[in-house]
Amino acid sequence: MDIPILRLGDTLLVTIQVDMHDRMALQLQDDLANRVVATRAKGVLIDISALEVVDSFIGRTLGNITAIAKVLDADTVVVGMRPAVAITLVELGLQLDGVRTALNLDRGMEMLEEAKVGRRQR
């Protein structure tokens, strides 16, 4: 089962609605990298509000997606993390290096817009 990737202007929007397993996470990583290049996206927004669990592999994959998108000239924001997921990540000592997070979709989109403005000013 592929996770749909929607395009909204120069932003790619991913809403994960099912519990992710490792193979699905790797497929999403590959699909997003290809779509960033194909669409010349400048932003990637990943909504994980439906996920009840983010294990170390999924956390690492989110970090990898962020790093890959950055190399491809796109910023990534992960939105909608549930409190229980955040608590678990902290208790396990998992760090989402380089992953920017926002509480909701609106704030995530604002963060991506701010990043675009910052790029134009450089």
Image (spheres, helix red, strand yellow):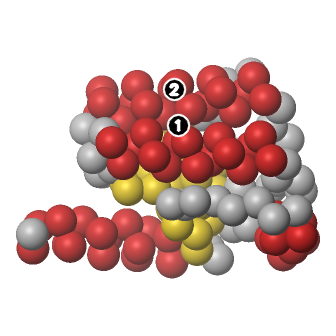
Task: Identify which residue is drawn at 49% across, 49% down.
Answer: 66
Residue nearest the viewer, comparing 114 with 57:
57
Separation of residues labelled 1 and 2 (CA atoms): 8 Å
Pick whichever of labels 1 and 2 is earlier in the sequence. 1
Residue under label 2:
31
In which quadrant will I find the C terminus?
A: bottom left
Whether residue 108 appears in this view of the structure is yes
Give coordinates of residue 92: x percent, y percent.
88, 62
Question: How many discs mark residues in the rendered view?
Answer: 2
Dot 2: what SS?
Answer: helix
Give coordinates of residue 91: x percent, y percent.
89, 70
Three-letter amino acid code of the residue under disc 2: Asp
Q: Are marks 1 and 2 in contact (CB under 8 Å)?
A: yes
Task: Identify which residue is drawn at 41% across, 73% down.
Answer: 111
Q: Vertical placement of 14 versus 91: above or below? A: above
Q: Nearer the viewer, mark 1 or mark 2?
A: 2
Residue under label 1:
5
Q: Which mark is residue 102?
A: none
- Using residue 6 as the reference point, say whether residue 82 is left or right of it: right
Dot 1: what SS?
Answer: strand
Task: Identify which residue is drawn at 75% across, 43% down.
Answer: 58
Give coordinates of residue 60: x percent, y percent.
68, 45
Q: Vertical placement of 49 versus 21: above or below? A: below
Three-letter amino acid code of the residue under disc 1: Ile
